[in-house]
């Protein structure tokens, strides 16, 4: 007010569902979409804290790989007695594709999905 400038338009939403895939978040945003106007920045506070005595800051989060995968094998239904062994199993194909990005035995992601953790961020893990 001292600078005689308008205040920025800010909308703060708090959604308290545990973990991801909130059942209500998209509904809530649909209800206030006219108030949101042109969104310039979204800040998600979704990490957690070690205790309730202080404010915790997360400087990085693990990555997310999201995709829609549609496996199509044949154009029309075929009786299993006619096509078993000839037509590949779609679940098996899916498992093979997933194994390309994550080792099913170790949980380790493919090297192309790995990043180098900056030294200062690595050292912060010991300060907890």
Image: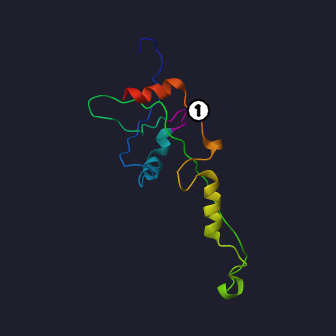
Q: Residue placed at 49% from the left, 39% from the top?
A: 36
Q: Residue placed at 69% from the left, 79% from the top?
A: 85
Q: Is residue 13 among the parts visible in the rendering?
A: yes
Left or right of 44 in this view: 67: right
Residue 98 horizontal/vertical position (percent): 61, 57
Q: Is residue 68 among the parts visible in the rendering?
A: no
Q: Is residue 7 magenta?
A: no
Residue 51 horizontal/vertical position (percent): 29, 34
Residue 84 horizontal/vertical position (percent): 68, 82
Q: Residue at the far front: name it.
A: 105
Instruction: Answer few, some or many: residues within 10 Å of disc 1's Cα (few below 14, many 20 plus, some between 14 and 19).
Output: few
Q: Residue placed at 45% from the left, 53% from the top?
A: 21
Q: Which residues are magenta?
A: 37-42
Q: Based on the displayed image, in which of its 4 quarters is residue 50 positioned? A: top left
Kindly state the secondary structure of the residue where label 1 is placed: loop
Magenta stretch, overall SS: loop
Q: In the rendered view, would you say 81 is above or below 119?
A: below
Seen from the viewer's position, the closer of residues 13 and 110 is: 110
Left or right of 27 in this view: 54: left
Seen from the viewer's position, the closer of residues 64 and 37 is: 64
Q: In the rendered view, would you say 23 is above or below 111?
A: below
Left or right of 118 in this view: 100: right
Q: Circle 1 is placed at which residue position?
A: 116
Residue 106 horizontal/vertical position (percent): 53, 51
């Amino acid at each position: 007010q001292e600078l005689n400038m308008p205040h920025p338009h800010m909308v703060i939403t708090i959604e308290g569902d545990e973990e991801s895939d909130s059942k209500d978040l998209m509904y809530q945003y649909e209800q206030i979409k006219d108030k949101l106007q042109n969104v310039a920045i979204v800040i998600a506070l979704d990490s957690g804290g070690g205790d309730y005595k202080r404010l915790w800051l997360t400087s990085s989060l693990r990555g997310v790989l999201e995709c829609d995968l549609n496996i199509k094998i044949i154009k029309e239904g075929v009786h299993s007695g006619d096509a078993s062994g000839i037509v590949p199993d779609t679940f098996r194909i899916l498992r093979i594709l997933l194994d390309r990005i994550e080792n099913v035995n170790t949980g380790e992601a493919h090297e192309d999905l790995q990043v180098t953790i900056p030294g200062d961020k690595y050292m912060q893990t010991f300060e907890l």
